[in-house]
Structures are given as structure tokens and as C-alpha cells.
Amino acid sequence: MSKPTLKVGITGGIGSGKTTICRIFETLGIPVYFADERAKKLMTEDAKIRAGLTEIFGEKAYLPDSNLDRKHLASVVFKDKEKLRALEGVVHPAVHRDGEEWHRAQQNVPYTLREAALLVENGSYKKLDKLIVVFAPEETRIRRVMQRDGAERAAVEARIKAQLPDAEKMKVSDFVIYNDGEQSLIRQVLQVHRVLSNRDL
């Protein structure tokens, strides 16, 4: 009898290199669900989510071209924690359901990966079988995000401070991948893949 497909989460702070590591897993034939990308898509395309967000934020939630007005929403939730909780209350359950359906649709793989920034913060890692945390030194992360987003240093530092410290994430992780430029990412990914595929957990 074949073993059930494991649900594995992968998370890490901003600029830690989660996406790069997910791409390596994909080359090994492992399907990856990019939760934040799916959330953006659902917030634009799912009628129930659109109705919920319009109720919370008003007509300004969406631009005239029907796309989500991310800047407007970000400016509101940054100042209003209740609105942030309301936003999460609409979006997170929908993304969870979408992720579950996606996972069930994957065939003949030992595990799937769910990539999301807030798996530990929102407690959703508890619904997964295993958790991978990607770690990178803070200075490296700041440099990467400044280059990637064209952001000011102070803005990147503020975003890092707003996230749960890596040490807290690592406490609940099953695997840590060190993206510090000193250890081989491919070797680390292969080690994790071997364990998850063989189930000698």
C-alpha cells in the first residue's frame, strides 16, 4: 500500500531565499503551492473574497480595472489592526481550502510543499506534516530585498522587525536550510528530499 502524500510547509523571513529553494525542489519533481501568489489571485478572481473585502474596505478595495488596490489595502491595514484581522479572516480560510484541494490533486509524489511567509505566525504549520525553515543572516536579507524591491534600508529593516524572529520559527521546524552563501543549497535540499521521500522521519 502506498504511503499518503505528506504536506510539508516551507517558510522563512523576507529575503531569506524561499523561492530559490522551492525552485530546487521543483527540479526534483516536487509540486510547490505558492500560498501568497495564490492569495493574490483569489483576492482578484474569487467572488466571495471580493464581496468580503469590499464589505470591509469599501469600493476602494478594487481598482477600476477590477484588480485589487494593494497599495490602498496596505495603507489601511498598516494603521488598523482590526481591519488586518478582518482581511485575514476572509483570505486565510479561502487560501487554506484552495491549498487542500491543490494538495489532493497531486498524484504520485512523496510530498508537496506549501510556501508561505506566515506559516508559523498564523499557526497554519500545525495543519502540516512537516515544516522547513529557510534561514539567512539579517544583513544578507536586507541587501537582497533592497536590490530586489528597490527599497530603502530602513523600510526593509522595519519589515524584518515586524516578522517573527528566525529563532522562534526554527523552534517549531523539522528542517532548517541555511541560505548563508557558505553551505551548498542543493546538497541541503537533497538531504531534506531524501528524508521526506524515504519517510525515515
Image (cartoon, rainbow, N blue to C red):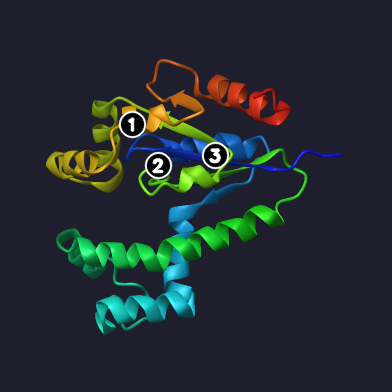
Mark closer to the chain start, 1 or 2: 2
Residue depth check, mark 3 versus mark 2: number of the one nearer the observer:
2
Q: Is residue 63 visible?
A: no
Residue plotted at (46% across, 25% down): 176
Question: Is residue 181 left or right of 24 when viewed as pictured?
Answer: left
Hey, what amino acid is under mark 1? Glu
At which x and y percent is residue 134?
A: 42, 31
Q: Position of residue 198 (x, y in %)?
A: 72, 26
Of callouts 1 and 3, the N-terminal one: 3
Q: Is residue 102 left or right of residue 121?
A: right
Q: Is residue 138 in view from this perspective?
A: yes
Residue 193: name its quadrant: top right
The residues tagged by marks 1 and 2 sit, at their Cα atoms, a distance apart of: 9 Å
Label of residue 120 in the image: 2
* Residue at horizontal 22 percent and vertical 70 percent from the top: 72
Q: In the displayed image of the protein, which residue is found farthest to the right? A: 1
x and y, in percent, of residue 79 in the image? 14, 61
Tell me the SS state at disc 1: helix
Three-letter residue code for mark 3: Arg
Helix, strand or loop at mark 3: helix
118 up-or-down from 47: above or below: above
Mark 3 or mark 2, which has the lower sequence index?
3
Disc 1 + disc 2, Cβ < 8 Å: yes
Q: Which residue is mark 1?
A: 168
Q: Nearer the viewer, mark 1 or mark 3?
A: 1
Give the labeled residue for mark 3. 23
Q: Which mark is residue 121?
A: none
Above or below 127: residue 96: below
Dot 3, crowdedness within 10 Å: few (<14), some or many (≥20)? Answer: some
Q: Residue at x 27, y 47 (%)?
A: 149
Count neighbours of disc 2 (C-alpha within 10 A) and say few if under 14, some if 14 to 19, many if 20 or more. many
Q: Left or right of 52: which side holds 7?
A: right
